[in-house]
Image (cartoon, helix red, strand yellow):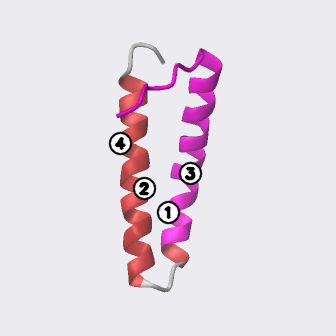
């Protein structure tokens, strides 16, 4: 498909920080959403963010 980017430790730390910020903000967005469709999309996004964070924290290079 395509080559995976090579990131420095500082870049990985930033990616994790951004994902953690997103993880912290999504519950409020879900709570305030009036549309059930949007809420479901946001819940799915939160699940993806959590899964990514779990994988990144478990990765030996991070």
- Residue at numbered disc 1: 27
Residue occupying image coordinates x 58% and y 57% = 25
Q: In the image, which is nearer the foreground, mark 1 or mark 2?
A: 2
Q: Earlier in the sequence, mark 1 or mark 3?
A: 3
Which of the pair 24/18 is nearer the observer?
Answer: 18
Kindly report the distance in space between the C-alpha atoms of the residues bearing marks 1 and 3.
Answer: 9 Å
Taking 26 as reference, is 54 left or right? left
Q: Earlier in the sequence, mark 1 or mark 4?
A: 1
Q: Earlier in the sequence, mark 1 or mark 2?
A: 1
Q: Earlier in the sequence, mark 4 or mark 3?
A: 3
Query: Mark 3: few, some, or many residues within 10 Å (few <14, many ≥20)?
Result: some
- Residue at numbered disc 4: 51
- Residue at numbered disc 3: 22
> Is residue 1 positioned above or below 35 on the image?
above
Prevalent SS, magenta region: helix
Assess whether mark 2 and mark 4 are in contact (beta carbons under 8 angstroms): no
């Amino acid at each position: 498909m395509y080559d995976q980017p090579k990131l420095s430790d500082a870049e990985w730390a930033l990616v994790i920080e951004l994902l953690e910020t997103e993880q912290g903000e999504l519950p409020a967005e879900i709570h305030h959403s009036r549309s059930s469709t949007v809420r479901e999309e946001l819940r799915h996004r939160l699940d993806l963010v959590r899964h990514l964070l779990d994988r990144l924290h478990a990765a030996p290079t991070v």
